[in-house]
Image: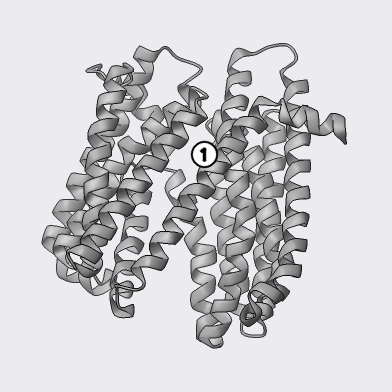
Amino acid sequence: MIKLLDKLLHNKTVRDGGIFAFFSFLNQGLNFFLLIVLSWYILPASYGDLNLFYTSVSVVSFVICLCTSGIVSIKYFKVTREVLSKYINFVLITTLVVSAVLLAAVSFFHPFVRSVAGITLPMQMWCIYLCSTAVIYNLLLDIYRLEEKPIKYGAFTVVSTLLNICASLFFVIVLRQDWYGRVEANIIASTSFLLIGVYLLIRKKYLTTAKPTKEICKETLSYGVPLIPHSCNGFLRQGMDRYIINSHFTSSSVGLFSFAINFAFIIYSVGSAFNKSNSVYIFKLLSLGQVDVKAKLRKQTVYMLGFYLGFTLLLYALCLFLIPFVFPKYQGSTIYLFPLCMSCFFQCVYLQFCNFLFYFKKTKELMYMTVGVSLLHLTLSLFLTRYSVLYTAYISMLSSFVEALLVYAYSRKLYKII
């Protein structure tokens, strides 16, 4: 155990992943603090409007750049910086074109959009603006991640979060602008980091005037477009599960289920944080083509999966013990913990192996697998949730297991390490 712990502490991927996880939890904690404070100044009805706005933001973010930004991670270790800048330029061109199309669409059809999304025309336009500015922000974060600079990555995200929080408190509490103040604060923070992001990308010579070739355009679109349905999987599963539970049971059942998910999601958050460095490690090794690549990746994978399983069991035990004492009103949520924690563990397994599909640009195949599993999940939830919410939790575990198994099996065809 001591030797294993020593190896883990001196493992660069684990160390960098730990830093990513620390900043991830710090940002989540700061946002949770903001949520608590704003609840004293924003009425429940206003919270509903704010939630509708950010639901629209999450939907638009799926399509704003057609999921093309992921190609940057794949090409980072394969091409020169000059060529990489052409890929980045095409991502930004795609974002501008899609933004223009969306702005034209809401200008003509804003009454229909308002009836569906519940937000006014100005807010529809601000929604598109926030999603488009986020592309630059996320590109810079990807560059820091690929450069293996977790401290700069974390510092950048924390400063962004703090600016967002301070501006939100000022507009909502001091200027009394209700939920609009939260949106205005987000607009100010996004604009600030848009300018900072453009400056840093130009300074790093990732953003140039290089014109992307037709081959780059075609390759990038072929990579990104199939990922759009794939990006909607989270909403198709957890989002729809809440609506289905609410249609058959009371709102308190939704609350208990959601409470358990919030704790189980810690596992996925840790997996996602570690994957930020682990994906870079995998892409880097595969691109270099060293003789002992498979042995290194096999060893790394065994360590990571062992860590995820151990963390899952530890978190489950702690939640099972602490929730009845710390949150007695939510004691009923503990029956959902095991299947939901295992669901998140299988999602971590999925993250470990889907990197190979991304590297070999098998995004279309990944889309078929993930969307197919999501449709299976939705079908089972529609038929079985009416009998028990616990069935919904086990459906989540089953769908995550099937998805992880399919991705693992397909990754072995591309690059067998286990």
Q: Looking at this view, is 121 or 221 the one in front?
A: 121
In the rendered image, which quarter contains the C terminus? top right
In the rendered image, which quarter contains the N terminus? top right
The location of residue 312, given as percent across then percent down, is 73, 54
How many neighbours does mark 1 have within 10 angstroms: few (below 14), some (14-19), or many (20 or more)?
Answer: many
Please name the residue shown 51% across and 56% down the image: 233
| Residue 294 against residue 302 in the figure, above or below | above
Please name the residue shown 49% across and 50% down the image: 230
Report the label total.
1
| Residue 96 against residue 131 in the figure, above or below | above
The answer, for residue 123, to whether it is visible in the render is: yes
The answer, for residue 365, to whether it is visible in the render is: no
Q: Looking at this view, is 44 or 295 the one in front?
A: 44
The location of residue 55, given as percent across then percent down, is 35, 63
Find disc 1 in the rendering and name its residue: 363
The location of residue 40, given as percent across then percent down, is 34, 73
- Secondary structure beneath label 1: helix
| Residue 125 against residue 281 in the figure, above or below | below
Please name the residue shown 52% across and 74% down the image: 242
The three-letter code of the residue at mark 1 reads Thr
Q: Looking at this view, is 378 or 56 the one in front?
A: 56
Q: Looking at this view, is 24 or 377 the one in front?
A: 24
**Residue that lies at the very extreme toward the front in this rendered image:** 174
The location of residue 171, given as percent across then percent down, is 21, 60
Quadrant of the rendered structure where residue 15 is? top right
| Residue 210 against residue 71 in the figure, above or below | above
Task: Please state if 141 lies on the left or on the right of 378 as rendered.
Answer: left
Please name the residue shown 30% across and 24% down the image: 200
Q: How is the image coloured?
A: one colour
